[in-house]
């Protein structure tokens, strides 16, 4: 990339562009001046297929003017818009500038609509179909690629409809998650647990917490090893939303179910990121999304009200 930091390539491109325009002008000039020797009947003297003759008529005026106008247009364009190397053009137009103008314009137009939404609490908005159709569209455009279009997630990406929360399911906590993102870290724990057999034992103990099928002898042996996990997942294994440590007793598995999956969690640990949306979405959009996400697991409750 260091090649592109200096001025050389900019000048090179600019010179090449200007040279080709001058070349076009020269071509026009030369062809306009050059008279082909013609015989008295206004032909060039070339004959094909016995009687096909080449006439020596000048190019039509309108065509020549069109050519000139095109060149003038090209020059004016290069003055106004970026095109000559790194010269930005008199209008200082950029694609990213045009894009942010469009986004700003759309945000301005939508501001009155969003003002109605932000004035209300997420719990209330979740029951408003027009707000929720906006929320659904925002979700499809910004969240569905990870959480799925039905928001049920997949391995590593949490289901947002099951009312089981890593970081808390209150509107405040959901908003915090969306705005600032989340960085969840489960460190590799094998060394703290002991031998590979100990790891298998603690995995079976974890399975026993949710009443999942497990080896009960191993689970008994693994129980004492769970102290290494309790700092984050709690003594009872019910998790800790303050650090995003999942509840291990609810039979809901973010990273897969079964001895194998848990052994791999303990051996390798896991880093899982929810990207912050603050720079990407406006506060009002995040407010509507908060209501949408909260509503996904609280609609039945709304319907009863
Ligand atoms: C690049 C993928 C990605 C995108 C895009 C994304 N998320 Fe997430 N999200 C995640 C991951 C991964 C987690 C889990 C983080 C963890 O393990 O703690 C998560 C967690 C969450 C949580 C917390 C769930 C809980 O149980 O506490 C919420 C709420 C959430 N996302 C909402 C959203 C919304 C709303 C959007 C769209 C604005 C969005 N996410 C976009 C990957 C993504
Ligand atoms: C430093 C805190 C910490 C410690 C100690 C810790 N964990 Fe975790 N654990 C986490 C976090 C945070 C996650 C969630 C990762 C994510 O969001 O993707 C997690 C996830 C898990 C999961 C995946 C749960 C699911 O739903 O798929 C299992 C299983 C697990 N831990 C077991 C253990 C066991 C067993 C131990 C002890 C040997 C342990 N953890 C120790 C923080 C910890």
Image (tube, grey):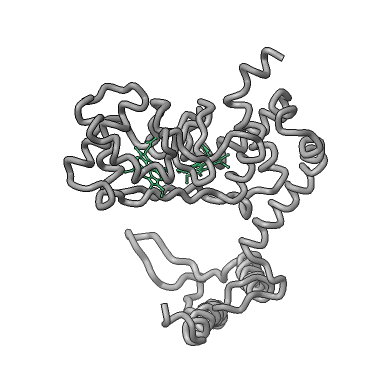
Seen at 58% across and 44% down, the residue is 177
Judge whether residue 260 can be spotted in this image.
no
Judge whether residue 163 can be spotted in this image.
yes
| Residue 154 horizontal side relative to residue 190, left or right | right
Seen at 57% across and 25% down, the residue is 297
Residue located farthest toward the front when viewing the structure as drawn = 224
Residue 80 on image: x %, y %: 69, 72
Residue 36 on image: x %, y %: 48, 79
Q: Nearer the viewer, residue 36 or 130?
A: 130
Quarter holding the N terminus is bottom left
Q: Nearer the viewer, residue 104 or 22?
A: 104
Quarter holding the C terminus is top right
Seen at 64% across and 65% down, the residue is 94
Q: Is residue 9 above or below residue 214?
A: below
Residue 261 on image: x %, y %: 28, 36
| Residue 130 horizontal side relative to residue 267, left or right | right
Regarding ligand 2, which quadrant of the image does it lie in?
top left
Q: Is residue 236 above or below residue 24?
A: above
Residue 172 on image: x %, y %: 66, 40
Q: Is residue 59 above or below residue 171?
A: below
Residue 201 found in image quarter: top left
Seen at 60% across and 32% down, the residue is 293
Q: Nearer the viewer, residue 3 or 248?
A: 248
| Residue 267 horizontal side relative to residue 187, left or right | left
Q: Is residue 162 above or below residue 74?
A: above
């Amino acid at each position: 990339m260091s090649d592109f930091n200096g001025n050389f390539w900019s000048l090179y491109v600019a010179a090449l562009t200007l040279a080709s325009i001058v070349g076009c002008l020269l071509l026009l000039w030369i062809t306009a001046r050059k008279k082909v020797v013609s015989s008295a009947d206004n032909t060039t003297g070339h004959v094909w297929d016995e009687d096909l003759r080449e006439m020596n008529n000048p190019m039509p005026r309108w065509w020549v003017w069109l050519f000139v106008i095109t060149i003038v247009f090209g020059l004016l364009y290069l003055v106004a818009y970026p095109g000559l190397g790194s010269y930005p053009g008199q209008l200082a137009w950029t694609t990213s500038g045009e894009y942010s103008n469009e986004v700003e314009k759309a945000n301005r137009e939508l501001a009155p609509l969003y003002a109605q939404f932000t004035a209300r609490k997420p719990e209330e908005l979740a029951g408003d179909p027009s707000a929720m159709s906006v929320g659904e569209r925002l979700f499809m455009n910004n969240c569905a690629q990870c959480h799925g279009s039905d928001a049920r997630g997949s391995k590593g990406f949490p289901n947002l409809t099951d009312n089981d929360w890593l970081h808390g399911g209150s509107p405040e906590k959901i908003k915090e998650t969306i705005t600032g993102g989340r960085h969840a870290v489960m460190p590799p724990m094998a060394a703290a647990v002991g031998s590979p057999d100990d790891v298998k034992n603690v995995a079976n103990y974890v399975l026993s917490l949710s009443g999942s099928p497990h080896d009960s002898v191993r689970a008994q042996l693994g129980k004492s090893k769970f102290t290494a996990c309790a700092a984050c997942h709690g003594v009872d294994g019910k998790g800790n939303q303050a650090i995003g440590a999942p509840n291990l007793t609810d039979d809901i598995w973010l990273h897969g179910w079964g001895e194998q999956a848990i052994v791999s969690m303990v051996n390798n640990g896991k880093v899982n990121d929810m990207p912050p949306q603050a720079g990407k979405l406006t506060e009002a959009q995040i407010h509507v999304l908060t209501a949408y996400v909260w509503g996904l697991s609280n609609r039945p409750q709304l319907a009863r009200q």
